[in-house]
Structure formats: C-alpha cells, structure tokens
C-alpha cells in the first residue's frame, strides 16, 4: 500500500458515513442495505417502502455517476459460478436472519455502540476471515 | 422533498462504494486475508464511515424527531440471541467465499460484471427463502424489535 493510497478508502468511507448520518437525521432510519432491500422488495423489513426504493435507486445512480466521473471501478471476481450462487444465498439469508449486514451492523450499529451490532460485526468479520483463511491457505484457490 | 433526500442518501452511499473500492471483491478478500498479504484499506473505509455516522448519532440524541419523519426508527434490543449469531455467521461465510456484501453487490451491478448479477439474484433468493420459510416465525420470535 503506497503512502497516499488510504485517501480513496477514507474518502469513500466518509461518503458512506455521510449517507448513513443524513438518513438518520432526516428520516430517522438505519441505512442498512440488506434491510432496505428487504423492505423495498417486500421481502420483510420495515419502514416506508418508497424511501427504501429511493435510497436503493440512488445507490445505483451514485455508483454509476462515481464510476463515470471519479474513478473507474474495477471488479475482480475469482469465485466460480456455483460459489457465487452459494455465497449469494448465504449472504441473503444470513443478513436477514441476523438483522443486518456490513452497513446496518458494521457502520450504523457500531456508530451507536449497539452491543448486538458489535457482536454481529465481530462474528461476520471473524467468520469471513476464517473462511478466506481456509479457502486460500488450507484448501487453496477456490 | 422526502423522497429526494432518500435518493441523495443513496447517491452518497453508492458513490462511496465506488470511491472506496469496496465494490471490488478482490480488494475485500485481501482485507479479510489477515494471514496472507493483508490489505488494510477497508479498515480506512470503516473508520471513515464511523466519523460522520457517529456524529449524526450523537446529534440525534438532542433531537425529538428526525427532520422529515415523525419518529426515529432505531432498534432498541440489546439481546445477543441465536438469530443474530446464526445470521452473522452465515453472512460471514458467504462474504468470505465471494467478497461481496449487500451494498457493494448492488453497486457492482453498475459496472457490467456478470458475476454481480448472479450474486445479487442469489442474494435476493436467500432473502426470499428467509421471508417465506415457514420456520421463520420461530426463528424471528427471539428478537421482534431487534431488526436493523
């Protein structure tokens, strides 16, 4: 990592946090993407559906804009097709069962020092790190 | 106005996904690979995100209601129960296998990577399975107010 390469992640993080902060102060809601998806697409979740859909639409628009104007996104996926499907199913089911993902628990929850979110974040980060360790260093190249 | 602000929040979030490079699974997996060639970048994303969201949370405590809604809808449960633990572990497993979580997965749809489309479809299927699963009533019972 070169000296200034932390600028991009830090700026991106500030944008994500500004989004979550604004959503809380304006609409009183948690900017958790898994919850917003569930509420927007009538798969459970709570809160006004139009705001969920507005947020998600904005997310796609913001990503498109930033990709065109600020930084060309690079998406390097090494997972095979079956692994993509299994991973997606686990992420979808798990985030709903555990009431949140990286944004809802990781950003919003930790910002308000919620014990549930701190525990969830430690658990999903820990499990993900162990998973990467097993697939990369024990089994090798999945 | 209400809807416009929600869209603006989404725009900021989506731009953050691209600017931070969270949208790139290779980058996320390199962060999770703590025993390998560890890339600390995503710690800066998390740290950066916590500054404004933490400030907003402190500000909200001095407010009676959000500016565009009647009440704050913030989870109040403090119980670390089985659904929370089971869900976080399954989510971590999926995240570690592919390197995508819900926000970046959605943002990846704008980059034209077919893998993002497959992943998001599977993720929605996973959410639907949870939602329509008959045993959900039992599963969710533990934390009716603990949703985030």
Image (cartoon, coloured by chain):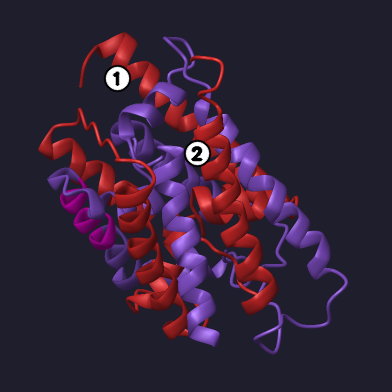
* Vertical order, A134 against B68 (above or below): above
Q: Mark 2 lies on which chain?
A: A
Numbered disc total: 2
Q: Which residue is drawn at 35% across and 71% down?
A: A57
Q: Is residue B38 left or right of residue B59?
A: left
Image coordinates of residue B80 in percent, x first then y, are 66, 51
Q: Residue at x 25, y 13 (%)?
A: A139
Examine the image and state in which quarter residue A55 appears.
bottom left
Is B129 in the magenta?
no
Q: Quadrant of the N terminus of chain B?
A: bottom right
Q: Which chain carries label 1?
A: A
Q: Main secondary structure of the magenta part?
A: helix
Q: Mark 1 points at which residue?
A: A135
Label 2, residues with CA under 10 Å away: few <14, some 14-19, many ≥20 = many
Label 1, residues with CA under 10 Å away: few <14, some 14-19, many ≥20 = some
Give the SS element for disc 2.
helix
| Part of the protein shown in magenta | B116-125
**Furthest-right residue in this view:** B62
């Amino acid at each position: 990592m070169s000296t200034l390469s932390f600028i991009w992640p830090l700026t991106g993080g500030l944008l994500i946090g500004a989004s979550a902060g604004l959503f809380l102060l304006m609409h009183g809601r948690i900017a958790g993407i898994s919850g917003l998806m569930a509420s927007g697409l009538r798969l459970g979740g709570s809160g006004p559906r139009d705001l969920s859909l507005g947020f998600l639409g904005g997310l796609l628009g913001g990503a498109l804009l930033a990709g065109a104007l600020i930084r060309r996104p690079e998406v390097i996926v090494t997972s095979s097709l079956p692994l993509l499907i299994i991973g997606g199913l686990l992420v979808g089911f798990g985030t709903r069962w555990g009431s949140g993902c990286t944004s809802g628990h990781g950003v919003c929850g930790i910002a308000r020092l919620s014990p549930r979110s701190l525990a969830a974040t430690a658990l999903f980060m820990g499990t993900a790190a162990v998973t990467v360790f097993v697939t990369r260093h024990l089994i090798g190249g999945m | 106005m209400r809807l416009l602000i929600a869209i603006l929040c989404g725009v900021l979030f989506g731009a953050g996904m691209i600017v931070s490079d969270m949208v790139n699974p290779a980058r996320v997996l390199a962060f999770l690979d703590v025993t390998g060639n560890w890339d600390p970048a995503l710690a800066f994303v998390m740290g950066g995100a916590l500054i404004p969201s933490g400030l907003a949370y402190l500000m909200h405590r001095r407010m009676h209601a959000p500016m565009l809604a009647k009440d704050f809808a913030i989870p109040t449960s403090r119980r670390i129960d089985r659904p929370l633990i089971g869900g976080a572990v399954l989510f971590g497993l999926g995240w570690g296998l592919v390197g995508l979580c819900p926000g970046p997965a959605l943002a990846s749809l704008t980059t034209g990577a077919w893998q993002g489309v497959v992943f998001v479809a599977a993720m929605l299927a996973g959410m639907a399975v949870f939602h329509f699963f008959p045993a959900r009533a039992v599963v969710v019972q533990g934390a009716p107010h603990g949703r985030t």
